[in-house]
Amino acid sequence: MTYARILATGSALPDRVVTNADLEKIVDTSDEWIRTRTGIRERRIAADGETTGDLSFRAAQQALADAGVKASEIDLLVLGTTTPDLIFPSTACLIQHRLGANGCTAFDVNAACSGFVYALGVANNFIRAGQSKKALVVGAETLTRMVDWSERETCVLFGDGAGAVVLEASGEPGILATCLHADGGYKDLLYNPVGVSVGFKDEKNHGVRITMKGREVFKFAVKTFDALVGETLAAAGMQESEVDWLIPHQANLRIIEATAKRLKMSMDRVIVTVDKHANTSSGSVPLALDAAVRSGRIQRGQNLLLEAFGGGFTWASALVRY
Ligand SMILES: CC(C)(COP(=O)(O)OP(=O)(O)OC[C@H]1O[C@@H](n2cnc3c(N)ncnc32)[C@H](O)[C@@H]1OP(=O)(O)O)[C@@H](O)C(=O)NCCC(=O)NCCS
């Protein structure tokens, strides 16, 4: 049996920190409202000219260096993002060239905030099928580029960042199960109304911006994670008690707490970075994973449950023996 094992992780954040107090100066909000409703205290925002590709490149370089793998050894590069540098080529192609991995399979996956877990699921299947021996998987966003800074309902929620993992084909367990889902019937609850084919302005002459029915998204996320946990454990043949760490999508601390409760996990076994990063969409799960690996909390041999949720709706999970 061939598994995809995580050799190493990496991450990258923009330098600029924007606190809730900073946002109080631009919209009618308060640090107290943001903290109690979401758990967010601050977020990072990309500098002018700093792109999803730049953050991806830095995260990938770190993961490759820590794995001791040369870019030229990578035969697959899958990048989850909904904020690519360009419409085409894909951001995966752009960073493939910068890294020096030219020639390998490289493509982006757009599954909104589930982008990284989707990309991980895709790479896992390439490795299990024998089509890849060493893969680089990235989740990266500059989501604040599509935030309307006059809308307090959304602008306080998002941030920018990237994370990456290097996977290797191995006889030792690695990724034990992945579950990937989508239901396009929920499009109107969370979407960006403009794009190439419909045009770059909507009927109200608005440009690119996140449109969201927050309360409904919240309810659906809690319900969906509840079912996803059960499905993923069953797919891996595991019990709740065997999961060492929950690494959830970092959108809202209250959603994370509800999932931990479902897993009967105390919050000290849950990786939380939403306070520092806000919702970085595809960047969120790999950023949290890398933070926990670097701080020494996650140890080799432990079981990690990764899960994400995003526009589409999409939802996805991975159970990983680290
Ligand atoms: C967005 C979210 C934080 C709002 O929290 P909530 O408890 O549902 O709050 P509500 O939407 O009920 O709004 C409550 C009030 O706060 C106000 N409000 C909204 N944003 C605010 C802000 N930034 N600051 C202050 N007040 C705000 C609303 O206008 C509303 O006022 P009203 O009662 O006078 O109408 C929450 O619904 C959420 O996190 N949803 C999921 C969003 C998400 O994760 N999206 C990404 C998924 S990948």
Image (cartoon, grey):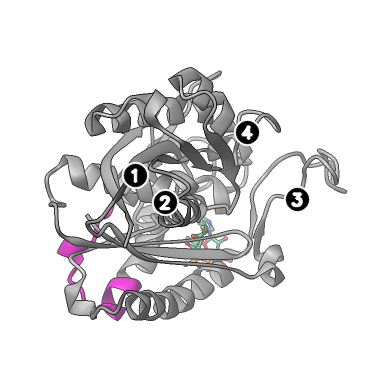
Q: Residue at x 52, y 23 (%)?
A: 102
Closest to the observer, 186 or 234: 234
> Of callouts 3 and 4, which one flags the residue occurring earlier in the amino acid sequence?
4
Q: Nearer the viewer, mark 3 or mark 4?
A: 4
Q: Are marks 3 and 4 in contact (CB under 8 Å)?
A: no
Q: Position of residue 80 (x, y in %)?
A: 52, 45
Q: Amino acid at mark 1?
A: Leu
Does the segment drawn in magenta span residue 269?
yes
Q: Position of residue 246 (x, y in %)?
A: 27, 63
Q: Position of residue 248 (x, y in %)?
A: 35, 60
The residue at which mark 4 appears reads as: 90
The residue at which mark 2 appears reads as: 127
> Of callouts 2 and 3, which one flags the residue occurring earlier in the amino acid sequence?
2
Q: Amino acid at mark 3?
A: Pro
Give the quadrant of the C terminus.
bottom left
> Of callouts 4 and 1, which one flags the residue occurring earlier in the amino acid sequence?
4
The residue at which mark 3 appears reads as: 193
Question: Badge 1: how crowded within 10 Å, few (<14), some, or many (20+)?
Answer: many
- What's the CA distance linking mark 3 and mark 1? 35 Å
> Of callouts 4 and 2, which one flags the residue occurring earlier in the amino acid sequence?
4
> Of callouts 3 and 1, which one flags the residue occurring earlier in the amino acid sequence?
1
